[in-house]
Image (cartoon, coloured by chain):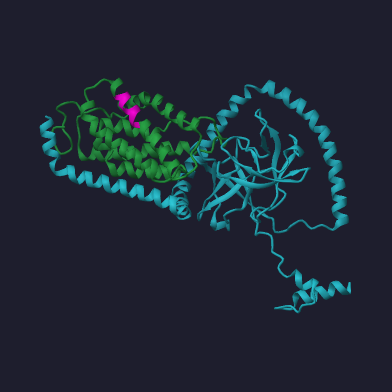
Chain colours: A cyan, B green
Amino acid sequence: MAKDRSNANDFTGPLRRLLLAVLILILGAIFLLWRIDSPRVERFRAQITDSIIPNMDWALAPVTGTVNLLRDYQSYQRLADQNQELRSELRQMQAWKEAALQLEQENARLLDLNKVRLDPRLTFITGVVLADSGSPFRQSVLLNVGARDGLVDGWATMDGIGLVGRISGVAQNTARVILLTDASSRIPATIQPSGQRAIVAGDNSAAPPIDFLESPDLVRPGDRVISSGDGGVFPAGLLIGQVAADPGGRLRVRLAADNERLEFLRVLRHYGTEDVTDTAQVVSDAPPVSGEGPVTEATEVVIE
Amino acid sequence: MTELSPMRLWLMRGGFVLLALVIVFFHILPLDTQPTRWAGPDLILAFACAWSLRRPDYVPPLLLAVVFLIADLLLQRPPGLLALLALIGCENLKSRGRSLRDATFAVECLTVAVVITFILVANRIILALVLVDVPGLSLTLSELGMTLLVYPLVVAITHGLMGVRKAAPGDLDTTGQRI
C-alpha cells in the first residue's frame, strides 16, 4: 500500500514541495520586512485589523456583555461582604468629600483671582473598547475611533480618572491603544510633591516600574505620579497613579486607571506645545526678520 | 464519514478557517485587560497539529499559512514568524502521519509535544537573535505547558465532535485512490 501511495505522489510531490518552499519564503520575508521596516508592516496590520474586527463587532459586544453579566452575578454572591466593605469605605470617603469640597471652593476662588483659562484645546474624543490584544504577551486595546475621527498617533488616552495609554496605530475606523502596562510603553512622568522626573516603563505586569529616577530617597510610596509632558508628545499633568514599593524594594506605579475593565476611553486631542522661537527679538533691539507681529507685541508691552 | 466528496473536503477546510476565527474571536474579547502571569494554550496550533496528523488533506499548506498569518496579525505577534514555524511543524507532522497512524495515542502525544516545543523554542530563539524583546520566560513556558496539557482534549473534540478521524486502511481519498 505504501508503494501505491508513493507512486501517486510522483506527480504531486515536487509541486507540493515547491509550494511549501514558496510559502516558507514568503512568511520569512514578511517577518524580515517587519523587522526592517516595522512601521509599514504595522500600518498594514492596522488596516487588516480595521477590515476584520469592526465586522465582528455585532458579536463581540453581546458576548462581552454576557460574560461580564455572569461575572457580576458571581460577585453578587459576595454581596454581604461587599456591603460591609463599602460601608467602611463610605465613612472614609465622607471625610475626604468634606476636604475635597473645601479645596474645590478654595481652588475656584484662586482660579478666579488668577483669571486662569484652562487649555481650551485639550478636548477629547470618547471611544468604545472593541477588543484587546488577544495575547498575554502584549497589552493593548482596540478603540472604535480612528483616522475618520481625526485621531493621531501618540495622543494620550484616559479612562475617567487616570492615564491608560497612548495611541499607536491608527486605521480608518479603529485605533490601537498601547497600555501603560505593555512592555514597550515608556511615559515621561513627574513625581509629586518632590517634583522628580522619571520614566514609567511598562514591563507586562500590573504595576509598571519607575525608571531613571534621580534620587529615589526623595520619593515615598503614596506619592502621586503625573505625566510631565517632556518631549511634547503628551500633555502634562495627567494623573498616572501612585508610587508603591514592591517586596523587592523597587518603586512601581499603582495605576489610577481601572485596567481591569476598560469600556470607554477618552482620547485627548493634543497638538503639541508651541515652540517659542523668536524671544531674542523681544529682548534685543535687532529688527525682526519677518513679519511685524513680535514688534507690535513688544511695544505694547513697553507701553503698558 | 466514509463519504469523501470534494464538497466535504472544502467544507472541512472552511470549517478549519471558521474554527481558527472563532478561537481568535474569543482571544480578543476585551474581558480582562490586566496583564496576567501565565498564558493560555495556543489552541490554533494544537488544532492544526491534531488535524495535520489525522487528515492532512483538510489542512493544506496554503490554508495553514494564511490562517496562522492572520492570527499573527490579529493577535499582535511578530507577523510571519510563528506562522512560518507552525507551518514547518505541521508539515513535519503530516510526513510522519502515515507511520503514526497505527501507533498508540501516547506516541502521538509525544511526537506532537516535541514538535510544539520545537516551534515555541525556535520562536523565542529567533526573536532573541533579531533583537526583538522576548516576552517573559514564565509566559512562554506556561503557554507551552498549557498547549501540551490541552492537546488530548483538542484531539477528543477533533475526533468526537468534528469527525476528523484518522483514515482507516482501505479508505478512499477525494480522487478515489486508496490512502
Quadrant holding the N terminus of chain A = top left
Residue A73 place in picture, x, y as percent: 59, 26
Image position of B145 (left or right of A261): left
Give me the residue at 44% from left, 48% from top.
Answer: A52
Q: Is residue B112 magenta?
A: yes
Please name whichever residue, A182 or B59, is drawn nearer the observer in this view of the structure: A182
Q: Is residue A60 left or right of residue A302?
A: left
Instruction: Give the camera-side residue of A171 and A280.
Output: A280
In the image, which residues are magenta?
Answer: B108-115
> Residue A233, percent across and down?
64, 55
Please name the residue shown 42% across and 36% down the image: B23
Q: Quadrant of the C terminus of chain A?
A: bottom right
Quadrant in the picture for residue A72? top right
Residue B91: image location, x then y, percent: 27, 37
SS assignment for the magenta stretch, majority: helix
Residue B44 lies, in percent from the top left, at 38, 35
Q: Is residue A53 left or right of residue B65?
A: right
Residue A83 appearing in the image: yes
Whether residue B46 is visible:
no
In the rendered image, residue A68 lying in the magenta stretch gets the answer no
- In the rendered image, which quarter is residue A246 located in? top right
Numbered marks: total:
0
